[in-house]
Image (cartoon, rainbow, N blue to C red):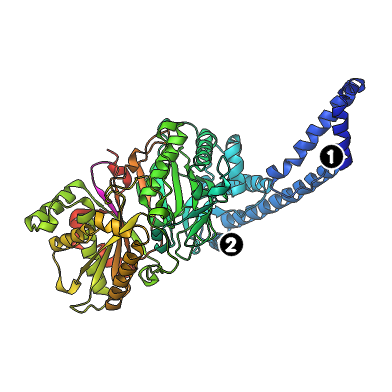
Amino acid sequence: MVRNRILECIMGLLRLGWLVRFISHYVISGFTTASAILIALSQAKYFLEYSVVRSSEIIPLVKSIISVFMASFCDGVDYSCNYADHEAIGKTRKNLRSAVNHESGAKTGSCHDDDILLQEDPLWTTILTAFSMLIYTEDKHAVVLPSSAHSVCSQYPAFIFILRPPLCYRVLKQDENNTKLVDLEIISTGNIKPAYPTPGHLRTFNLSIIDQLFFDSDTPTILFLPNTDNICLSDVITIRSGRLKESLSELLTLYYPFAGEIMNNFHIECNDRGVYFVEALVNQTLEEFLHQPDDQKVKELIPKHPTTKEPSLGNYAISVQVNIFNCGGIGLCTNLSHKIVDGTTYFTFMKAWAAAARSDSSAIISPCLVASDIFPNNPFIKQWPSKLWTTKLPCTKRFVFDSMGLASLKAESLSNATPASRGLTRTEVTAAVVWKAAAKAASTVRPFSPDSPHALFTFVNLRKRASPPLPNELIGNVISAGTAICFPNKQPDLATLMGEVRESLSKLNSDYVESLKREKGHETFIGFQKMISDLIEKMDEEDCLFATSLLNAGIYQIDFGWGKPIWFYHVNPGCSRIVSLNDVKKGGGVEAIVSLSQEEMEIFERDPEVLSYATVNPSPLKFLN
């Protein structure tokens, strides 16, 4: 091989290309044709989905392909004969039909009686089996093709009509209990790296002390984007998803820490590892999915399930999954590490990505990467007590407070007005309602004494609370939590709790932000942690609620170039007691995504006060007009 390369170089330097003139046209034509045939045969493995021998000669390739075809053909014929026999038995002897169906169901998991779920078979077996099913199956629409046929159908739509025009093909994604969740197939995975390498002097990105102390968890968020101009599905896959990849690569040159690797609680190695990027096809329309979205179904659209067992360390800072519905709509999921991203950082990044996708360079927001200079980390300060962030499997439901309900809540606070409860925000009134009902549910499930407290930790953005304000594009966790206490057995009224929430947040003022800065801020963090530790000693570790607010962030104004989102969903990052407050599409309402233990949720969702202001699990489509 080396000799050939050297000889080619020498011939090139000596300009000996004129020697080709002496080679016969028929020789060149034959050589070119043989090369084309060899290349075509070597690609057969991607169509047959079998391992075909690698060779630079035609005869071994042809032999390998023939053996593969015969094996697949025999498998398909065998399956078809067996299936035909079963159907014949079922039609002639009714008493045996249920046994045949039962046997098929046992092999395929949790299929319905009339559904047939094929295993992962090669293409030729799939085609023969599909034909036999269409011939013998009474319900033609119950046929479920494997992923091999799904990939062929997506590339060659005519294959669908060869089988049967109305045939619906799908791939069932199942959970551990074999319960169908989402008809979804992963069509590609890979890493999106920055368009240009990160310079050597920027290879180490230091985390701030707030990043250092914050819980290490993933925070998946999903934007549901409609296909407003009704372009075909193939164009959505090739053009729109392709543009998302290209623009993300361009943007990572600015947001280079997001393409790095989180090494520990103190720094990110900006090694251009990239963003883990997944493309998936969802076999239903976006409207069908949003008609009654379920939290567990929505979680199937994320690249990986959220967890709190140090998911970030040594892992991707960001993962992305582009879920393409068969109507052309997209569920764009970004799974971000909370070690570097808070709510404001997420929206800054998404707005910049959308501008890059539209090729609107003037609207691309450049990040401010100096949080560690303002809030330097300290290896001698420990994280928050881990007992607060329990990972018991939560039950999550959505409660939507419309504008009329919020107006009623604010009016109630005014009727019992105190100086601390005047002019309450949507965050404060909604958090107070949820907190009161959650504390009541906790005191019902577990014994509370009159002096047993229940705590609410409300996280807020500190950027605007500083004086002068910190840049909105400051990357990282620039947040802190106000702490409010109530005593459920004393049955506090709602107006009182609203005042408690307002007072806890009013303490997070410009003086407080100033006390967190530079090395002097380390004493403030130590004092805050001592206060939390003292509080935990007085209460059960489960007697608290975390609240986050993403209200007024402008999420529904993000535009990647083909329409603004019709729904935004914030997936529980892994905490069993948390409420996330989001805007609804229109009307000025608030969507509260509440996660509690199963026992507490059964009480919470029936709370008359909550139900008087909120609707449980309504369709997001309801708020489009």
Quadrant for the C terminus in the image: top left
> Could you tell me residue 346's position as x and y percent?
40, 48
Question: Which contiguous range is marked in magenta?
Answer: 586-592
Quadrant for the N terminus in the image: top right
The structure residue drawn at horizontal position 65% and vertical position 44%, both measured from the top left corner, is 127
Q: Specify the amino acid type for callout 1.
A: Ile
Q: CA distance from mark 1 to mark 2?
A: 40 Å
Q: Earlier in the sequence, mark 1 or mark 2?
A: 1
**In the image, which disc is placed on residue 58?**
1
- Return the residue nearer the eye: 392 or 229: 392
Q: Nearer the viewer, mark 1 or mark 2?
A: 1
**In the image, which disc is placed on residue 107?**
2
> Could you tell me residue 15's position as x and y percent?
86, 24
Classify residue 231 as left or right of residue 481.
right
Q: Quadrant of residue 380?
A: bottom left
Q: Specify the amino acid type for callout 2.
A: Lys
